[in-house]
Image (cartoon, rainbow, N blue to C red):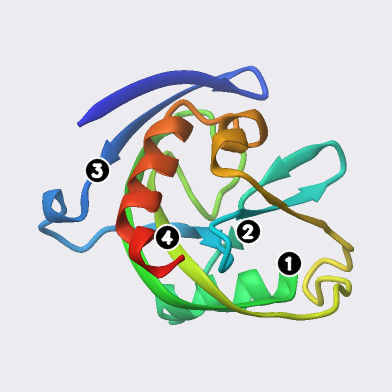
């Protein structure tokens, strides 16, 4: 377990990394995102405005988490994925969260995935945004994804899938 304290839009947030085996009860997962590798071992990142991030998003009502992940990655990056392995969860404590769908305490799932198809970029049907897509070297990951545990995540994801690229 690793605990991180940071600020989001000026508000204090606490996040705790949880491995899948640590979760014994039903939890509220409000987001799924994927570290997606192509055949060369490069990682997909997408850009909306000035910020690069991992593709992913929020589940629709009664939608299974893996289906959410696949749908969001297709909508945002026009990428089909396979072999999705759960890395763990960020447990978030955010007392001043402006997002009422998430409330003050929630979880976000992180996966490692392999890319099986790359489509032509188009606007996200849910938001109308045309994201930029880039494949980066694993060593560049922390330059693009500026989370407290970015380095640990890319190491975990690479270890999980290293035999496939």
Cα distance between the residues tagged 1 and 4:
17 Å
Cα distance between the residues tagged 1 and 2:
6 Å
Cα distance between the residues tagged 2 and 4:
12 Å
Q: How crowded is mark 2: few (under 14 residues within 10 Å), some or many (20 or more)?
A: many
Q: Is residue 24 left or right of residue 150?
A: left
Determine whether 162 is above or below 153 in the image: below
Determine whether 164 is above or below 153 in the image: below
N-term-proximal mark, 3 vs 4: 3
Residues 155 and 64: in front is 155
Numbered label attached to residue 55: 2
Q: Where is residue 107 in the image (x, y as percent from the top left)?
A: 37, 49
Residues 62 and 160: in front is 160
Q: Position of residue 121 (x, y in %)?
A: 85, 73
N-term-proximal mark, 1 vs 2: 2
Determine whether 153 is above or below 73 in the image: above
Q: Where is residue 92 in the image (x, y as percent from the top left)?
A: 39, 38
N-term-proximal mark, 1 vs 4: 1
**Residue at x-position 81% and y-position 71%:** 124
Numbered label attached to residue 112: 4
Which residue is under mark 3?
18
Numbered label attached to residue 76: 1
Residues 60 and 71: in front is 71
Report whether residue 132 is seen: yes
Residues 27 and 53: in front is 53
């Amino acid at each position: 377990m690793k605990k991180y304290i940071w600020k989001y839009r000026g508000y204090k947030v606490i996040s705790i990394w949880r491995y899948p085996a640590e979760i014994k009860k039903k939890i509220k997962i409000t987001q799924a995102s994927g570290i997606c590798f192509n055949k060369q071992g490069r990682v997909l990142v997408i850009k909306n405005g000035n910020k690069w991030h991992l593709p992913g998003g929020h589940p629709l009502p009664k939608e299974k988490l893996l289906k959410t992940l696949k749908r969001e990655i297709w909508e945002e990056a026009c990428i089909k994925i396979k072999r999705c392995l759960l890395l763990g969860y960020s447990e978030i404590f955010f007392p001043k969260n402006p997002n009422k769908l998430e409330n003050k305490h929630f979880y976000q799932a992180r996966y490692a995935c392999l890319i099986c198809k790359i489509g032509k970029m188009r606007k996200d049907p849910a938001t109308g945004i045309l994201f930029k897509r880039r494949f980066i070297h694993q060593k560049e990951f922390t330059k693009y994804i500026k989370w407290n545990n970015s380095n640990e995540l890319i190491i975990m994801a690479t270890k999980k899938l290293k035999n496939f690229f």
